[in-house]
Amino acid sequence: MASKYSIPLSEIIKELSLKEIFMPCNPTDIQISNKDINRVGLELIGSLDFFEKDRILVMGRSEQAFLSRLTPSEVTKSVEAIFMLEPPVLLSTRGIEPMQEVVEVAKKYSIPILVSEEATSDLISELVSLLSLSLAPRISRSGVFMNVHGEGIVITGESGIGKSETAVELLNRGHRLIADDEVEIRKISKTSLIGSAPENIRHFIEVRGIGIINARRIFGIGAVKLTETIDMIINLESWNDNKTYDRLGSDNSYTEILGIKVPFITVPVRTGRNLAVIIEVAAMNNRQRKMGYNAARELFISLGMEYPNSNPEMEKCIWDI
């Protein structure tokens, strides 16, 4: 499926250590926008009814063996029917360089040819993983993203509420920073969101009264991480005496990001509350819930009370306000 995002062929060559056999132009100028792969098979015998020309072509040992049984003119005719549709690139696996007839037709239609030393299945797996991440739907939102006890926690809240200061305290307690101020969120599957920091502000934190600090330099390489799965949103807000806050944890609240529901809680902020400790506990509690344990349910049962079966509620995240 085509994406509105793209990745240059040069980056694919670099990431997968591909060897160039024929390159008609600068690979940076060739943009790949479809995360699906075409493994050349039935297309070699003329079955092109469902062929999508913007997919990367992959040719393995079986396809090479099939072509080797054909006469040179048959090879030319077979691959020309494919290359005339102008696919972006042909990848050959297991270090097998395509036959001369294939290269000649590729030159005629300016189709790049690359070779990988990997087995076909391994290359396709790596390629799909790379394209899924690079071409994934994405949004950028304000917030701080931390790895706390293995859980990916996005901390949101109004400017000045204390998000960055809380992040520094969490770093000092041994947790890891992914992003401060802006979080890039990508939907890599129907159930998973990955968050990262924009490259130009990666590892930097703004702390009011101190200024900009580099978390990697101050806390060490082990205190930062490039990407993380988003497991939970914690919204910090100023304490409101007129608002009722969840005290049992029996409510299941979610916010929706790129069509995926993510657990969402609101933590009220006032003098004397240790936000770093609260977020640590929230992260561990969220992990327990994913494993099927709910402390509120156990308390209700031990008191002989019926646990309220409330439906999951969708809350409005500060990003949507």
Image (cartoon, rainbow, N blue to C red):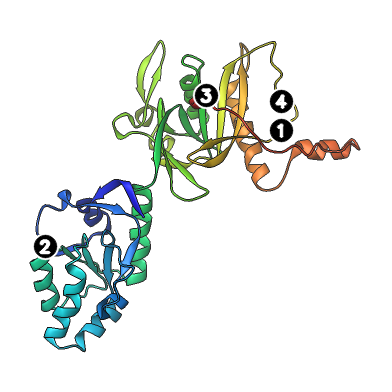
Crowd band around label 4 with a 10 angstrom C-alpha radius: few (<14), some (14–19), many (20+) = few
The residue that disc 3 covers is 318
Is 79 left, or right, of 216 in this rendering? left
The secondary element bearing badge 1 is classed as loop
Q: Residue at x 63, y 17 (%)?
A: 273
Mark closer to the chain start, 4 or 3:
4
Crowd band around label 3 with a 10 angstrom C-alpha radius: few (<14), some (14–19), many (20+) = some
The quarter of the displayed image where residue 25 is located: bottom left
The residue that disc 2 covers is 110
Q: Residue at x 26, y 49 (%)?
A: 7
Expressed as whole percent of the image width and height from the top left, the position of residue 151 reads: 55, 40
The alpha-carbon separation of the residues under discs 3 and 2 comes to 50 Å
The alpha-carbon separation of the residues under discs 4 and 2 comes to 63 Å
Mark closer to the chain start, 3 or 2:
2
CB-based contact (under 8 Å), mark 1 and mark 4: yes
The alpha-carbon separation of the residues under discs 4 and 3 comes to 18 Å
- For the residues carrying marks 3 and 2, which lies nearer the camera in this image? 2
The residue that disc 4 covers is 246
Front residue of this view, candidates 188 and 284: 188
